[in-house]
Image (tube, rainbow, N blue to C red):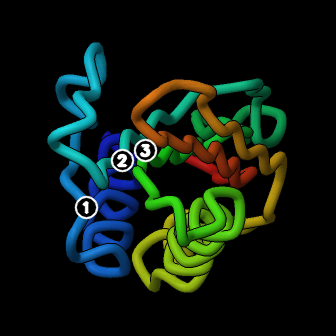
Amino acid sequence: MSETAILTAARAAVAASLPNAKDWTDDPSDPRPDKLDAFVLTLNRTGSEPASMGSDLEDVTMDLEVEIFTTFTPSEEGTAKASALGRTARAAIMADSVISALCYRVQGGAFTVEIGQSEIRLARVNATTALSAEF
């Protein structure tokens, strides 16, 4: 339940910060170049342990990954454009009040940018945010 709330809040935060991007979180299998900018969010549980002896709560660590797909023109620098989108999305996630209320730790993690070498100029950025929560 709480993981669903975190993912829902993250989707809303990224959608608000990237208003021209489509949310493909429910169907991430085939980002089409003619339908970009787009983003996909995934929330992966990386660990858990009992919060305290005798408690029903768990201390859970998670990685929230936002993957953004974009195109760029010959006059644009693809790495800079994709990086800016990734930084914007990550900042929105880290500043979101719902995520802050549900998680006691929200910290930036891995950040990568890939540029495609094809006729269509494509870029992809992955920005990971590490989360810790108790539920």
Q: Nearer the viewer, residue 126 or 1?
A: 126
**Mark 3 vs 1, N-terminal side:** 1
Asked if residue 15 lies left or right of residue 66, the reply is: left
Picture quadrant of residue 25: top left
Q: Do tag 2 and tag 1 residues touch (Cβ < 8 Å)?
A: yes
Residue at 37% x, 39% y: name it: 40
Residue at 66% x, 38% y: name it: 115
Residue 82, position as x, y percentages in the image: 59, 60
Mark 2: amino acid = Phe
Q: Which mark is residue 125?
A: none
Mark 1: amino acid = Ala
The N terminus is located in which quarter? top left
Q: Is residue 132 visible?
A: no
Asked if residue 117 lies left or right of residue 34, the reply is: right
Q: Is residue 115 visible?
A: yes
Mark 3: amino acid = Phe
Q: Is residue 105 above or below residue 129?
A: below
Mark 2–mark 1 Cα distance, whole angstroms, equals: 7 Å
Query: Element at badge 1?
Result: loop
Q: Nearer the viewer, residue 98 or 88?
A: 88
Location of mark 2 (residue) = 39
Q: Nearer the viewer, residue 72 or 97?
A: 72
Residue 7, position as x, y percentages in the image: 37, 48
Mark 2–mark 3 Cα distance, whole angstroms, equals: 6 Å
Query: Element at badge 3?
Result: strand
Location of mark 1 (residue) = 21
